[in-house]
Image (tube, rainbow, N blue to C red):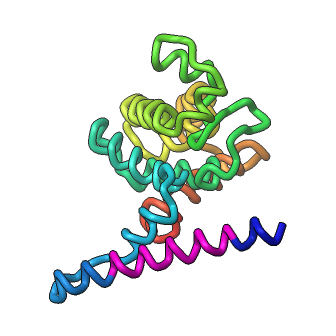
Amino acid sequence: MIKKNKELLKKDFIIFIYTMLITSSIIMCYPNSIFNLNLIYSNIFNNKRLTKIEKIKKYSHEYSKEYGINVNLIRGVIKVESNNGKYQLSNAGACGVMQIRPSTATYLTGKYVSCKELINSTKLNIKIGTIYLKRLIEEFHNVSYAIAAYNAGPTITAFWLYHLGYIPDSGVATNDVLGYVDKVEYLVYHPSRLN
């Protein structure tokens, strides 16, 4: 046990010395440049894949541009639906960061998409969620109604709008929907709250 600890300390010390040598060499070569030491340290110590939030940011921006949807709207839905990926599976059977049901994903893509795929592929989940948002905006011609439809479903939202002309503010289900719309819209206009 003690021998293993000494070996680990020796490795850590060697990495530390190596890091310091690289850092001092770069600073000597480029004394007037502004440069991020965190990049060096992260490459040496954290040689791993993107974190969940980094993936969310990357793919939200990518699909925002591709489908013409406000990136803060995509990120707002992700934040409210799954708290940026903290909750990957809902009681209603919705999966992944944007809480897409496999049946919805299958309908939108034209091929079977499992819950496991929606949870394991942040990229796929955000792509399908963005496509769904775009379709809802096109269907309802109103971002607030599209957000409500994303939460309650397009059928019930269309029913409310057709028969009542608005989304009612009474009843357990509708209170949840209006609260959901308010939360997402707040995040769209206050992007500092998205992380």
- Image coords of residue 42 (percent x, y): 45, 66
Determine if the magenta segment contains residue 157.
no
Image: 157 above or below 186: above
Query: Would you say the magenta stretch is mainly helix, strand or loop?
Result: helix
Residue 90 placement, left or right of 33: right
Count of numbered badges drawn on the protein: 0
Tell me if residue 26 comes above or below residue 87 in the rendering: below
Judge from the rendering whether residue 93 lies leftward or rightward of residue 96; answer left or right: right
Horizontal placement of 69 versus 109: left or right? left
Residue 186 visible:
no
| Quadrant of the drawing holding the N terminus | bottom right
Q: Is residue 10 magenta?
A: yes
Along the viewing direction, whichever of 184 and 144 lies nearer the viewer:
184
Q: Is residue 120 above or below residue 19?
A: above
Residue 175's x, y, as percent? 71, 51
Q: In percent of the image, x 36 and y 77: which residue is there?
A: 37
Residue at x 39%, y 34% (from the top left corner): 134
- Residue 21 is drawn in which quadrant? bottom left
Q: Quadrant of residue 133?
A: top left
In the foreground, 74 or 19: 19
Residue 179 shows up from this direction: yes
Q: Nearer the viewer, residue 131 or 25?
A: 25
> What segment carries the magenta color?
7-23
Could you say which is closer to the camera, residue 161 or residue 2?
A: 2
Q: Position of residue 102 (x, y in %)?
A: 62, 22
Residue 17 position in % (x across, y down): 46, 79
Residue that protrudes farthest toward the right in the picture: 1
Q: Left or right? Give the position of 21 relative to 186.
A: left
The residue drawn where x is 46% and y is 17% is 109
For residue 68, above or below residue 114: below
Query: What residue appears at the point 42 percent right and 45 percent down from the top-left corner?
Result: 143
